[in-house]
Image: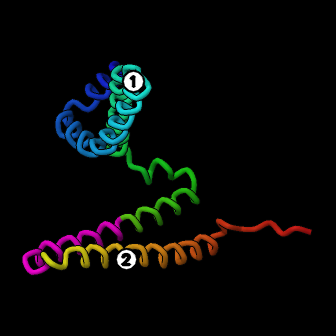
Amino acid sequence: MLLSIFILFLVDIKNLFKRSKKVFVSIFFFNLGVSLGYVLMAYINGFSPWNYIIYINLKVFMLTYFVFTFFDKINVIQFFSFSKDLTYLLTMTLSQIFSYKKTFEDFRMAFKSRVVSLRNKEKAFITNTLKFFFTKAFKDSKEKSLALKARGFFSEKVKK
């Protein structure tokens, strides 16, 4: 495993510290929760968790670093260009991701610009934002489902 991490670092030497920081930040809370739970269970059951904790955290770091490097180096749309259907699905997925990202940024900037006057209304603002995203996801899922049906993705075989 350490050899794999070393090879990844060599391949990505220019972005080593920047990407390592990004990977660490993205996995920190998840790994912390899982690790603390495992350490607690290990002490309750009377065995040493440290070898496994180190192993699993290094593995998560390595896989996450690989995925970040892979998607930085590879154009995903060209990668799936061998299949018209996969390219269509990927395009729909990416358009939805970018749409949600833009909407989230709009909400974040609106909140940031009004944070002084919203202190007592933060919970309501966050609740309304979550409701908006759930409603948007529900409506978008219906729309995407209809678009996929129109393209023949959910064709049902007729039983005779």
**Who's the residue at 67% across and 67% down the image?**
154
From this view, report whether residue 34 is shown above or below residue 45.
Answer: below
Residue 44 locus on image (x, y percent): 40, 29
Secondary structure mostly seen in magenta is helix
Q: CA distance from mark 1 to mark 2?
A: 40 Å
Quadrant in the picture for the N terminus: top left
For the C terminus, the quadrant is bottom right
Q: Which residue: 41% across, 22% down?
A: 46
Give the residues in magenta: 98-118
Label 2 element class: helix
Q: Quadrant of residue 155?
A: bottom right
Left or right side of 86 for 28: left
Q: Position of residue 13 (x, y in %)?
A: 21, 30
- Tell which circle, 1 or 2, labels the residue nearer the N-terminal end: 1
| Amino acid carrying mark 1 in the image | Tyr
- 62 sits left or right of 91 in the view: left
* Crowding near the residue tagged with mark 1, few <14, some 14–19, many ≥20 C-alpha atoms within 10 Å: few
Q: Give the side of residue 148 with respect to residue 23, left or right.
A: right
Query: 146 or 74: which is nearer to us?
Result: 146
From the viewer's perspective, tell me whether residue 119 is left or right of residue 44: left
Q: Based on the picture, tell me whether residue 115 belongs to the magenta stretch.
A: yes
Element on which disc 1 rests: helix
Q: Which residue in the structure is indicated by mark 2?
A: 131
Q: In front here: 44 or 119? A: 44
Mark 2 residue type: Lys
Percent x, y of residue 37: 37, 37
Q: Badge 1 is on which residue?
A: 52
